[in-house]
């Protein structure tokens, strides 16, 4: 077994390890490859990172590219270049300065991507800001704060309102009419079901718009189903 | 030569695919990122494609998608194919009818039938063979093309490129442009053939696979 454990304040040059554990404040100056990385404090990796599992409870900064099978963020991760991961569970915050590509994303915190973001399965109970294209197979989004992307494209995209049953939050809502929504310039997909969204152009095959959807223009192929309170300025049926 | 552009919307109508499929293929890298050209129009930003290139690619994806998985297709389109060995013997190339014996005789005379040829060489022979068959070049011009491309093969295999062949006042000119770009000649040059290497490699791979299926 070749493990790296850093406790306290320290630095390492990188390399290939089985397990890397950081409890404290560490700097890794080169590329690092390992089976599992656990960071409970603060870590800064100046090279590229490759791991099967990355678990961050504290604050991690990767200045290079990150490639992993599984990423779990309870704290914060900042990535300088690109991220490629099979599964990502984000309970804290993930910031990516390049583009990112995932198989499945479970987002319960925040995600920020400066480039494009790709995922087969995109499950959101939090918020995201994507400055490029969000390209998804299926997306299931419940925005807890505004979810922004320049463009969203995919096969099936569902946006639902936060379900607040009773209690103080409902009262709070009574005084502040703010409601989180998905905001984007353009959304394109096969099946779109949007409860709460603010979109300039929607294009798709089957589109359902809920009561708090506001759309400038809808272009649909098969059918459009819209709630009477949904704001739609223009709806056009496109025939193939 | 400016190539015709097609908007994403028209593309879907023309090919009969849905947004979901298009995005899916993009995620699988079957349609490369560079092909998506963003332009501003009166409705805001729109995505365009080079018409011939993208229609061709989508037709091919559609025709292959029943037989191959998306991941297998990627290996056909990208430079790295799992199916096509980097080296096929001269015999196999002849059997699968990728290159005619005439061309092989001219350029690979000293190579024995069971000796391997590199993938780059096969593509090069295929290109010359095709141009010869179409009657666009003469055999000595084939030689010129061979000599021109051969030193740059490893480069264009990695970075793609463009091959142009033309004549000015009866004098043949062969040009290789590495990485994607445009090439412009003076007006008296008649461009006879223009080929992207990526397209060439794909064609040979398709031919190779087609040959295998017929067996």
Image (spheres, helix red, strand yellow):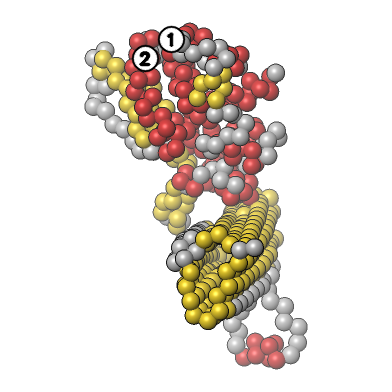
Looking at the rendered structure, whether the residues under marks 2 and 1 are on a common chain is answered as: yes
Q: Residue at x 27, y 22 (%)?
A: B189
* Location of residue A225 (image quadrant): bottom right
Q: Which mark is residue B143?
A: 2
Q: Within 10 Å of the Cα at label 1, are there few (<14), some (14-19), or many (20+) other Cα atoms?
A: some
Residue depicted at x 57% and y 15%: B114
Residue found at x 68% / y 70%: A160
Location of the C terminus of chain A (image quadrant): top right
The disc numbered 1 marks a residue on which chain? B
Judging by the rendered image, the residue that carries numbered circle 1 is B106
Check contact, mark 2 vs mark 1: CB within 8 A.
Answer: yes
Residue lying furthest front: A1
Q: Report the quarter where the N terminus of chain A lies.
A: bottom right
In-image side of B41 versus A186 (left or right): left
Query: For this rendering, which residue is in front, B150 or A155?
Result: B150
User: Quick check: B153 left or right of A6?
Assistant: left
**Does the image show residue A185?**
no
The residue drawn where x is 72% and y is 78% is A163
């Amino acid at each position: 077994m070749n493990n790296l454990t850093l406790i306290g304040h320290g630095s390492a040059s990188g390399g290939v390890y089985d397990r890397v554990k950081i409890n404290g404040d560490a700097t890794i100056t080169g590329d690092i490859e390992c089976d599992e990385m656990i960071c409970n404090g603060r870590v800064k990796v100046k090279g590229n990172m490759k791991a099967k599992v990355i678990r961050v409870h504290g604050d991690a900064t990767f200045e290079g590219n990150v490639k992993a099978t599984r990423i779990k963020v309870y704290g914060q991760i900042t990535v300088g270049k690109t991220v490629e991961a099979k599964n990502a569970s984000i309970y804290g915050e993930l910031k990516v300065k390049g583009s990112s590509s995932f198989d499945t994303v479970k987002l319960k915190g925040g995600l920020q991507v400066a480039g494009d973001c790709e995922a087969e399965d995109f499950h959101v109970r939090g918020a995201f800001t994507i400055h490029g294209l969000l390209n998804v197979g299926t997306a299931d989004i419940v925005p807890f704060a505004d979810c922004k992307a320049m463009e969203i494209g995919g096969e099936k995209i569902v946006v639902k309102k936060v379900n607040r049953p009773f209690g103080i939050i409902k009262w709070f809502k009574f005084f502040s009419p703010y409601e989180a929504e998905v905001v984007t310039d353009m959304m394109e997909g096969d099946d779109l079901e949007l409860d709460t969204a603010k979109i300039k152009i929607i294009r798709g095959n089957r589109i359902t718009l809920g009561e708090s959807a506001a759309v400038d223009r809808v272009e649909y192929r098969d059918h459009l189903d819209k709630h009477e309170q949904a704001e739609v300025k223009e709806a056009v049926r496109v025939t193939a | 030569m400016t190539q015709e552009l097609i908007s994403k919307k028209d593309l879907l109508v023309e090919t009969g695919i849905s947004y979901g499929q298009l995005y899916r293929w993009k995620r699988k890298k079957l349609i490369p990122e560079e092909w998506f050209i963003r332009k501003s129009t009166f409705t805001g930003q729109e995505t365009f494609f080079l018409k011939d290139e993208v229609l061709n690619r989508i037709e091919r994806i559609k025709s292959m998608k029943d037989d191959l998985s998306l991941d297998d297709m990627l290996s056909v389109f990208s430079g790295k194919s799992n199916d096509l060995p980097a080296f096929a013997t001269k015999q196999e190339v002849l059997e699968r009818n990728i290159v005619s014996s005439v061309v092989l005789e001219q350029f690979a005379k000293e190579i024995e039938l069971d000796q391997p040829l590199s993938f780059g060489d096969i593509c090069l022979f295929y290109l010359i063979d095709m141009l010869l068959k179409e009657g666009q070049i003469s055999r000595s011009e084939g030689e010129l093309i061979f000599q021109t491309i051969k030193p740059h093969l490893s480069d264009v295999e990695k970075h793609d490129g463009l091959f142009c062949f033309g004549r000015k006042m009866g004098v043949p000119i062969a040009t290789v442009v590495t990485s994607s770009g445009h090439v412009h000649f003076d007006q008296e040059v008649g461009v006879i053939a223009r080929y992207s290497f990526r397209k060439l490699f794909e064609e040979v791979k398709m031919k190779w696979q087609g040959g295998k299926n017929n067996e």
